[in-house]
Image (spheres, rainbow, N blue to C red):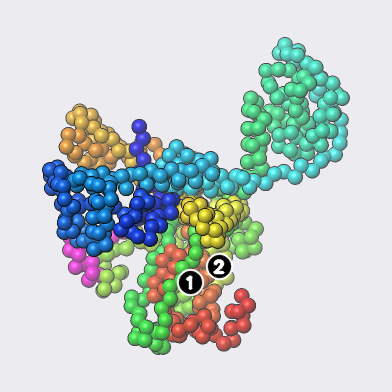
């Protein structure tokens, strides 16, 4: 038996009401008191039930019975009117009937919503309870499914004509005779097959020549006879063995697209995986200025703040996913003279492991949003590191004080860090300096997931224009937001949970080298064990590329948009998150009144 939690198939923090609204449309009743659609909110006096006997009470519980001391909440007058209406409408005899009604409201719509969600995934030939144990797992399959539907095929341009070599056909006759198989072929038949196949391999579709053409038996248990022969190249003939024609053709198609697909990192590339894991850094969450108020605070101590606006980069990770991704097999190459010029000229693509710094004359330019994002160990007990305000705050927490931990910060420099080529090119174009190079992880550049990005975006647009498609649009939004999450998952943190009640078995688990933790239950123990073997097959480089492209976009928004079109005396960054920025401006309509006069025409044009 497998127990699944529906919370794994929805975004974190999704309420039951939101779930029903997404997949069933929610309650549409105008009169919420007399709602009978089954999608309205149920009410029950949890804390009033102090014993089973209370369920036998025959009167509607008083309004105060619905108060919750635990949550510090009370129901409204309209909500209590609904309780009284439900009691009368359904001819309830006791509080037990109210409990049954309440439970049915929880269960019946829930089952219908699950069925609706399950049907939507069937559009992709996926069973959400069989093909994945979470939304990210299913979304990843949808993402790759969309990618594989857009593979490129060989050109199938006809090759130059030639005659099948007589000597090779004689060899097939001898093979069949030695193996006591039937042989029934003629040169005319083989030449006819060559003509029909346009002198192309029937498996990989490469152009054939006299030296590469062969007669491949479709069924290897039979001989070279009419109907059991396909003209292929010698390489495919040898490699196919007993594989079906369809299966082998698909394998060759994947090989043809190898530089357009994202591969997992295998054991031979374990060093690359280690570097990737050490350099993965999620979205930054940075406070630049702690307080701003309209008509009160000043921007950089100068002009009065007139407007504070929050900007959100819509579907930033999805946009990043649709851009150039590191495809093909990753390989490490040693740095060489001119490698930086080759990266800038797009001659090579991938990740450069290097030291990078901001020149002294540019530190003022990069002072507000420092350009390098990196993880460092932050000592919360050192006032000189975290500042007086946060130090005092941490000290006031006493027993709950934060301990030293690795945090994502903005910096002027980075040492031995991996930088993705598009971000690196932006750094170099803005004057930053690479002082040392250690290695380059080479990849092929291709927009492997652009079709997935378009599919999600188109579904969301259709949902906006056609409300009947809103459910599909909402599901595609969830898929788009969670598709790449598994690629950066740290599988070393995965644990196995086991339950034991036998004392000897418990002791054996505790003494085992994979033991992680134990929690005592009433008559058993919940034991957490580390996994004995971990298969790090997830394409972690996909996550690093997406995270760095997202950072690139936020840097572009600051330096190539806001800082380019506005005077620094007219704006001040307050805080930023992964895909958002909150900015204080010195005018009410910043993108109308604050643009530099000499750049207004340029801004309107672009």
Tell me where residue 395 sits by quadrant.
bottom left
Camera-side residue: 214 or 584? 584
Horizontal side of residue 478 vs 525, given as left or right: right
* Image location of residue 275, percent across then percent down: 46, 51
The image shows residue 359, relative to residue 280, as above or below, that is below
Distance between the Cα atoms at labels 2 and 1? 13 Å
- Give the labeled residue for mark 1: 358
Horizontal side of residue 216 vs 366, given as left or right: right
Quadrant including the N terminus: top left
Picture residue at 46% right of the left edge, 43% below the top: 118
Q: Is residue 394 magenta?
A: yes
What main secondary structure does the magenta stretch of the protein show? Answer: helix
Where does the magenta region start and end?
391-405
Picture residue at 46% right of the left edge, 68% below the top: 312
* Image location of residue 330, percent across then percent down: 56, 48
Camera-side residue: 214 or 440? 214
- Give the labeled residue for mark 2: 426
The label shown at residue 313 is none
Earlier residue among tags 2 and 1:
1
Camera-side residue: 210 or 216? 216
The image shows residue 244, relative to residue 33, as above or below, that is above
Nearer to us: label 2 or label 1: 2
Q: Is residue 121 magenta?
A: no
* Image location of residue 390, percent across then percent down: 27, 70
Picture residue at 18% right of the left edge, 52% below the top: 60
Picture residue at 87% right of the left edge, 25% below the top: 188
* Image location of residue 592, percent across then percent down: 53, 83
């Amino acid at each position: 038996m497998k127990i699944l939690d529906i919370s794994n198939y929805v975004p974190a923090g999704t309420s039951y009401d939101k779930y029903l609204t997404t997949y069933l449309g929610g309650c549409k009743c105008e009169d919420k008191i007399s709602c009978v659609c089954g999608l309205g909110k149920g009410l029950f006096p949890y804390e009033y039930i102090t014993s089973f006997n209370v369920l036998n009470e025959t009167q509607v519980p008083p309004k105060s019975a619905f108060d919750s001391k635990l949550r510090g909440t009370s129901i409204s007058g309209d909500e209590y009117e609904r309780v009284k209406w439900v009691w009368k409408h359904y001819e309830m005899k006791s509080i037990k009937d109210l409990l049954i009604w309440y439970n049915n409201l929880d269960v019946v719509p829930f089952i219908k919503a699950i069925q609706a969600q399950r049907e939507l995934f069937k559009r992709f030939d996926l069973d959400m309870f069989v093909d994945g144990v979470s939304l990210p797992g299913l979304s990843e399959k949808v993402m790759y499914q969309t990618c594989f539907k857009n593979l490129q095929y060989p050109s199938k341009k006809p090759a130059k004509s030639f005659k099948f070599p007589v000597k090779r056909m004689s060899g097939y006759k001898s093979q069949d005779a030695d193996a006591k198989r039937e042989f029934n072929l003629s040169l005319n038949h083989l030449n006819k097959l060559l003509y029909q196949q346009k002198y192309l391999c029937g498996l990989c579709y490469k152009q054939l020549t006299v030296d590469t053409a062969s007669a491949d038996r479709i069924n290897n248990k039979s001989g070279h006879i009419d109907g059991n022969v396909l003209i292929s190249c010698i390489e495919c003939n040898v490699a196919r063995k007993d594989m079906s024609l369809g299966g082998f053709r698909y394998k060759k198609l994947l090989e043809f697209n190898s530089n357009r697909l994202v591969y997992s990192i295998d054991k031979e590339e374990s060093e690359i995986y280690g570097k990737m894991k050490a350099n993965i850094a999620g979205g930054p969450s940075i406070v630049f200025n702690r307080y701003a108020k309209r008509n009160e605070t000043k921007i950089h101590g100068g002009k009065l703040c007139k407007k504070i606006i929050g900007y959100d980069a819509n579907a930033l990770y999805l946009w990043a996913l649709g851009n150039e991704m590191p495809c093909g097999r990753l390989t490490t190459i040693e740095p060489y003279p001119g490698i930086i010029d080759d990266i800038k000229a797009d001659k090579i693509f991938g990740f450069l492991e290097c030291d990078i710094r901001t020149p002294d004359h540019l530190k003022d330019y990069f002072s507000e949003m420092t350009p390098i994002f990196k993880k460092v160990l932050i000592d919360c007990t050192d006032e000189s590191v975290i500042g007086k305000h946060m130090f005092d705050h941490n000290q006031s927490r006493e027993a709950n004080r934060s301990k030293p931990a690795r945090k994502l910060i903005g910096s002027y420099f980075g040492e031995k860090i991996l930088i993705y080529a598009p971000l690196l090119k932006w750094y170099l174009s803005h004057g930053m300096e690479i002082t040392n190079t250690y290695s380059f992880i080479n990849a092929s550049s291709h927009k492997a997931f652009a079709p997935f990005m378009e599919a999600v975006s188109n579904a969301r647009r259709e949902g906006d224009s056609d409300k009947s498609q809103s459910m599909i649009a909402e599901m595609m939004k969830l898929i788009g937001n969670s598709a790449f999450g598994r690629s950066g998952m740290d599988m070393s943190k995965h644990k196995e949970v086991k339950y034991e009640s036998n004392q000897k078995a418990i002791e054996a688990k505790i003494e085992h080298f994979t033991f992680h933790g134990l929690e005592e239950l009433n008559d058993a123990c919940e034991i957490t064990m580390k996994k004995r073997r971990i298969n790090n097959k997830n394409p972690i480089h996909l996550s690093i590329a997406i995270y760095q492209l997202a950072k690139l976009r936020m840097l572009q928004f600051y330096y190539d948009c806001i800082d380019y079109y506005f005077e620094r005396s007219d704006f001040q960054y307050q805080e930023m998150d992964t895909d958002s920025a909150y900015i204080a401006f010195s005018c009410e309509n910043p993108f109308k009144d604050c643009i530099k006069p000499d750049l207004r025409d340029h801004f309107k044009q672009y």
